[in-house]
Amino acid sequence: MLCRMADILSVTVDYLLGESDEVDLTNLLKNPRIVQLVSCFQELNDRDQQRVLEMVQLIRQTANPANTDLGGRDLIREGGTDGLPIT
């Protein structure tokens, strides 16, 4: 169960258990949305990258906790309360 949760969130089991503060980049880069986001982000100039970071921070601050799982993923857009994205 813990392994499945770690896979869904693209983190290590150690991270979930609080034994590590670092996210495993290898697992993180298996998520196609992360790869797409990084690719788009790299194409932006410094000013626009800063604007994107500010927008993401604002979204995180104003997100409704009832609609997100422990990893901050939007359950309404991603398929429901089971935490699995719609495929």
Image (spheres, rainbow, N blue to C red):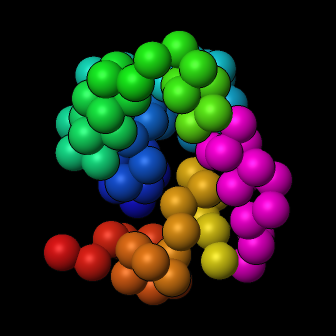
Q: Position of residue 11 (x, y in %)?
A: 44, 36
Q: Where is residue 86 in the image (x, y as percent from the top left)?
A: 27, 78
In which quadrant of the rendered image does the C terminus lie? bottom left
- Residue 38 visible in the snapshot: no
Query: Residue drawn 44% across and 78% down?
Result: 77
Residue 17: image quadrant is: top right
Identify the residue at the far right of this view: 61
Query: Residue drawn 31% across and 34% down?
Result: 40
Q: Where is residue 57 in the image (x, y as percent from the top left)?
A: 72, 42
Front in this rendered view, residue 52 or 60:
52
Front in this rendered view, residue 70 or 4:
70
Q: Position of residue 62 (x, y in %)?
A: 80, 62
Query: Residue drawn 53% across and 60% down?
Result: 73
Magenta segment, which residues?
54-66
- Residue 66 visible in the snapshot: yes
Q: Is residue 64 above or below residue 25?
A: below
In which quadrant of the rendered image does the N terminus lie? bottom left
How would you classify the magenta stretch by its main secondary structure? helix
Q: In this view, does 20 lie above or below 60?
A: above
Front in this rendered view, residue 84 or 18:
84
Does the magenta portion include 64?
yes
Name the side, left or right, on which 44 lies relative to 43. Answer: right
